[in-house]
Amino acid sequence: MTDKEEKLRGLASTSPGLRRLRRQATADCPEFDLAYTRTGPPSTRPVVVLPGGPGLASVLPYRRFRARAAKRGVDTIMIEHRGIGLSRNDTRGRDLPRTAVTISAVIDDIAAVLDQEKVDAAVVYGSSYGTYLACGLGIEHPNLVAGMVLDSTMLSAQDHHEVRSHARSLLWDGHNSDTASLARTLRTLIDEGAHDQAETSDAARIVYEFGGSALLQRFLAQLRNGCADRTLSFLSNIGGQEIGEAVAVPYWMEFGPVAGIAFTELNYAPDPDGGPFDPAPQFSSVASKYPPFAGEPFDIRSRLPGFRWPTAIISGSRDLRTPRPVAELAHSLIPASILLDIENGHSALDTHQLIALHVIERMTQNRPDQLVTPSDEKIIRRLPIRGSSTRFLPHIISIRLRLDKATAFVRRLTYLRAPDHRGTP
């Protein structure tokens, strides 16, 4: 173990509220200790928060989130996903085998933690991949669910069809008046042949999700003028390391140990269709290392009409990974649900935590309908952005664009001052 790993493990191991649950050996899994946290004042209706991924840890990345929740009096349980971080090894110090890391086993872990904590029912908050786990818990253990929050909803291993069509409608076909000019600029860049379609469309998705239309317009304009190549390279590397390496950041992002879920159960690497904004190429380079898609454990869409608990569905207006049509479908199928449209990209839990906490408070108070009243909508619009380090990404992109522009200017000035070009226009 490196010094960095030792430090991160020590930090994770000293997290407030850390607890462990011994999971007994099964035919597919050796005995191991499942780590989880419980923070905030104890209550009869805690909130179980399930982050995205798979691969994202719970204990270390969300320390600040849990501190904010505790200050608001929220009783929060977060479970370190088996195979990751403090739940990665068996009792003999070996990595859990792939056969032990399945969606059904993870859902059983959630139920086991609630049993150990003597919780009859909880509000279950899922973000992105965590929404799939939340729905799975609702299917397998409906008695444990008092309410549910689906933040950036994922419903099926076939969601990539909606992902493709929604992104293309906005940023390629320009069907939305707010993005029509962006789509024209992007298509022109690709048609001119100077930039790779997959790389450029994926970079455009990141800029749009995190920075909005104005920043994307600036990026595309500079790219067309040859003044954004380094920014493009930077954007192309975002996320690539997380899936390209088994452990990108120990105790934080560990994709490799749980990639069997991503590829074998959730079809993260479907066949590419050759068009822009296709999520498949992002994962295709590493998919060959893992078993192919075999089928998902649940038909969630067919089970949603049976969800009889209050459900809040959060959908970011700029979310291109778990797009609005999927959230709208969930809303249409879940009887007691509300759809909360927020000005945001993907995952309020990660990028706009004060909204996430506001929704959690309303759900634990059993007042979800309040979320769509004018007074709450006003509160939500005024909440400052707090979240993970990705909240700084728009500023980083903006700074990189300025540097790219300055570099291009200096390069051009140097060229003009060269003896062979002195005096030329």
Image (tube, rainbow, N blue to C red):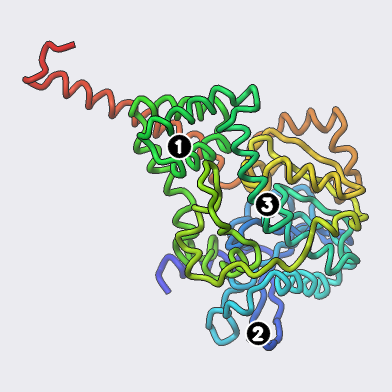
Q: Amino acid at mark 3?
A: Asp
Q: Which mark is residue 167?
A: none
Front in this rendered view, residue 352 or 150: 150
Residue 258 image offset from top left, x and y in percent: 58, 68
Mark 2, residue position: 28
Q: Secondary structure at mark 2?
A: loop
Q: Is residue 402 above or below residue 417?
A: below
Residue 396: assigned label: 1
Mark-to-mark CA distance, 3 and 1: 30 Å
Q: Which image quarter: residue 40? A: bottom right
> Which amino acid lies under the numbered mark 1 shown in the image of this protein?
Ile
State if disc 2 and disc 1 touch (CB < 8 Å): no
Q: Which residue is mark 3?
A: 159
Residue shown at the point (80%, 65%) measured from the top left: 137
Q: Disc 3 versus disc 2: distance between alpha carbons?
A: 29 Å
- Position of residue 73 in the picture relative to residue 13 (left or right): right
In the displayed structure, 42 sits above or below 188; it is below
Q: Residues within 10 Å of mark 2 (few under 14, many from 20)?
A: few
User: Of tags 3 and 1, which is closer to the observer?
Assistant: 3
Q: Residue at x 79, y 50 (%)?
A: 149
Can you see residue 185? yes
Viewer-nearest of labels 1 and 2?
A: 2
Q: Position of residue 94 (x, y in %)?
A: 53, 83
* Image location of residue 247, percent across then percent down: 48, 66
